[in-house]
Image: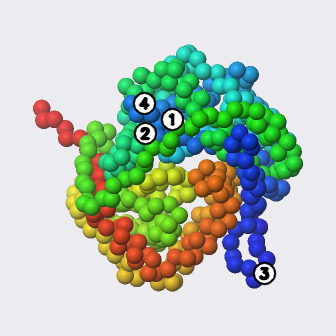
Amino acid sequence: MFIAPLAAGAQKGMTIPVEYYKLTNGLKVVLSPDKHAPIVTVAVYYNIGFRIEPKNRTGFAHLFEHMMFQGSKNFPKGEFDKLTERNGGFNNGSTRFDFTNYFEVMPAHMLEPILWAEADRMKGLDLNQASLTNQQGVVKNEVKVNVLNRPYGGFPWLDMPQYANENWYNAHNFYGDLKDLDSANLDDVKKFFETYYAPNNAALVIVGDFETADAKKWIEKYFSAIPSSTLPSTPDLAEPVQQKEKRFTKEDALINKPAIAIAYKMPPRNTPEYYAMGLIDQLLVKGKDSRLYHRLVQQKGITANVNGGINYLGNMFNYNGPMLWMTDLIYDGTVPSDSIITQVDLAIADIGKEVSDESIKLAMVKMRSFLYDNLGGFYGIGLADMLACFALFDDNPSRVNSLEQEFRQVTPELVRKTISTYLTPGNRTILITEPAKKESK
């Protein structure tokens, strides 16, 4: 994706073309043309993620993502992959906290067939018991491979929300309990599809080489007649204010070294403190010049690498609800965990004491690098993701062009305020996973 420069003398920032409108059935449409390569990316995002999946059906949102690849009444199972792959493209999908998405990257001349195919499965997914049984098995095996039978499986991306949060919607096992996956029935699947996989609960994004008039004509032709649904009220996702540090330990029989994760509850989205946390994140954990890398790797030699960030299942822009800033690392068992926590506290304190206009400029350089890499790379998928999320969550995909300006409003005083409010022991959860104790013979 080419990001055009602004005119001389204008405030630096992105100028991504964004056209936004809605069909009469409620479908949100975002168009962002770019003629620099003869490819097109189509993405459909549904405003249903695993955060608000039905109770006693953990993992259901993810299970349904798999069901969307089982064919429609006009396009049998396997034909979607053939359409993309035989024409030099690819497709995929994923389930996240607040959305489930499906996308295709194709040669530009294949835009109309892809729009038809996406509309076809939106209006007429082939839901049957054989497909459900098959995909229940697939998802259960995925849980076993990615979590249950893998060292550090689920740590900390899956584990931490369950320990740090109190509200069930934020704290349940998103990947799915095997009993819950088994108990899902065909009626559940049909009701879920009819409720959430409707145009008034979705955003359609097209990025790349296309003619706007043609795209609008095809979108109207294939999507406008799909009926909207009656959406249920959104559950209350609010988390109680955390007043006291929480600490937990779990065992993992597949690991030889312990690992620690430290998570702090984030400020609400789009607040000044939210943008400050984005820059604090850059200073704390992004790159080998970050405070935690310097202290834990270079200075103390406690670990070989430090992970961290806002939203381990995406980034700071593609969620809509309570979120955690988190850092984690694997360390030697001879190192006391409290010494690691102390170094994290000192790194945070360093930023609070030393923050200046210069350090904020450094964080901005790193943030701009992330933004431009994400929005300008990988066939436009990163841009489509952000446009879709801003359409779904904010009704304003043009927000993409104002992000830099929002970060520029962050001052040293705001950074210090954010640290003193959110990066405190009382607002954090610490989770340590240890090698399982071996039974003596």
Quadrant of the snapshot with the C terminus: top left
Q: Earlier in the sequence, mark 2 or mark 4?
A: 4
- The percent position of residue 260, horizontal first and vertical second, equals 31, 54
Quadrant of the snapshot with the N terminus: bottom right
Q: Earlier in the sequence, mark 4 or mark 3?
A: 3
Q: Are marks 4 and 3 in contact (CB under 8 Å)?
A: no
The kind of residue tagged 2 is: Phe
Q: Nearer the viewer, residue 289 or 256?
A: 289
Secondary element at image label 3: loop
Residue at numbered disc 3: 8
Q: Earlier in the sequence, mark 1 or mark 3?
A: 3
Q: Residues within 10 Å of mark 3 (few under 14, many from 20)?
A: few
Measured Cα–Cα span from mark 2 to mark 3: 48 Å
- In this view, the mark in front (2 or 4): 4
Q: Residue at x 30, y 56 (%)?
A: 429
Q: Nearer the viewer, residue 36 or 273?
A: 273
The kind of residue tagged 4 is: Arg
Q: Are marks 1 and 2 in contact (CB under 8 Å)?
A: yes
- In this view, the mark in front (1 or 3): 1
Residue at numbered disc 1: 61
Measured Cα–Cα span from mark 1 to mark 2: 9 Å
Q: Residue at x 51, y 84 (%)?
A: 357
- The percent position of residue 134, horizontal first and vertical second, equals 53, 20
Measured Cα–Cα span from mark 2 to mark 4: 10 Å
Measured Cα–Cα span from mark 4 to mark 3: 55 Å
Q: Is residue 367 left or right of residue 344?
A: right
Q: Residues within 10 Å of mark 1 (few under 14, many from 20)?
A: many
Q: Are marks 1 and 4 in contact (CB under 8 Å)?
A: no
**Residue 104 visible:** no
On residue 174, the disc is 2
Q: Is residue 210 left or right of residue 313?
A: right
Measured Cα–Cα span from mark 1 to mark 3: 48 Å
